[in-house]
Image (spheres, helix red, strand yellow):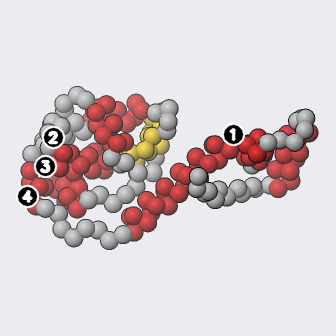
Amino acid sequence: MSRTMIPLTVGDVSAFARSLGGQLARRDGTPGHLELLNMLARSAGWRNFQHLRARQLDQDALDRDCRERAAPAPSQADPQLVRRVLRYFDAQGRLIRWPGKFSHRLPCLWVLWSRLPARETLSEPQVREVLERWHLFGDHALLRRELCDNALVERTPDCREYRRRERRPTAEGLALIERLNRRAE
């Protein structure tokens, strides 16, 4: 098993020591490895060690996304693909039908991704509302699932909170978003 460093930062070392001391005093004997990790995490304000670890992994994923966004964009969009995918949208920029071809789906998802508010946590009903506003075939669940499966949107394990992942769209996705925005003006 590989070891991942998980930094533990505490705002008030005195409160941390008090909390840890209190947990150790309530215990008979020496805590085991996992129990000690949980005590340390709780003293620092986390629910348990798994909660601390999950948040660190989320931060690592966010750092990777930032590095991806800093990478140079792909050179040129395929104009023929963009023209074909534009046919899936009406004059108001709403998705008319779900593409059968896999190569047409991702550019459509980038358009829907662009309609979600950046850097905001949304509830499932809020995501549904946005998706229902921007498609006409009545399957918001399919679109939400596809956005999550393609890592354009992340959600909590209980599916209560959704957040748009800030990434740079593909060249075709960018071209399609720009064309649809110009069409709506």
Q: Quadrant of residue 71?
A: bottom left
Q: Measuring from the top left, give residue 63's x and y in whole percent.
A: 50, 61
Disc 1 residue type (three-letter): Arg
Disc with the residue nearer the chain's start (3 vs 4): 4
Q: Residue at the front extreme?
A: 1
Disc 2 residue type (three-letter): Pro
At a point 19% along the width and 40% down the height, the residue shown is: 94
At a point 43% along the width and 59% down the height, the residue shown is: 65
Q: Secondary structure at mark 4?
A: helix
Real-space Cα separation, disc 3 to disc 2, in angstroms: 8 Å
Q: Which residue is mark 1?
A: 47
Real-space Cα separation, disc 1 to disc 4, in angstroms: 52 Å
Residue 178 is left or right of residue 83, and the answer is right
Within 10 Å of disc 4 (Cα), the crowding (few <14, some 14-19, many 20+) is few
Q: Which residue is mark 2?
A: 99
Q: Which residue is mark 4?
A: 80
Q: What is the number of callouts on the image?
A: 4
Real-space Cα separation, disc 1 to disc 3, in angstroms: 46 Å
Real-space Cα separation, disc 2 to disc 1, in angstroms: 43 Å
Within 10 Å of disc 2 (Cα), the crowding (few <14, some 14-19, many 20+) is some
Disc with the residue nearer the chain's start (2 vs 1): 1
At a point 17% along the width and 49% down the height, the residue shown is: 103
Q: Quadrant of residue 7?
A: bottom right
Query: Looking at the image, do the residues carrying marks 1 and 4 touch, with CB atoms under 8 Å apart?
Result: no
Q: Secondary structure at mark 2?
A: loop
Q: Which residue is mark 3?
A: 85
Task: Residue 111: tell me if it is visible.
Answer: no
Choose mark 1 or mark 3, whichever is in front: 1
Disc 4 residue type (three-letter): Gln
Q: Residue at the top extreme?
A: 138
Real-space Cα separation, disc 2 to disc 4, in angstroms: 16 Å
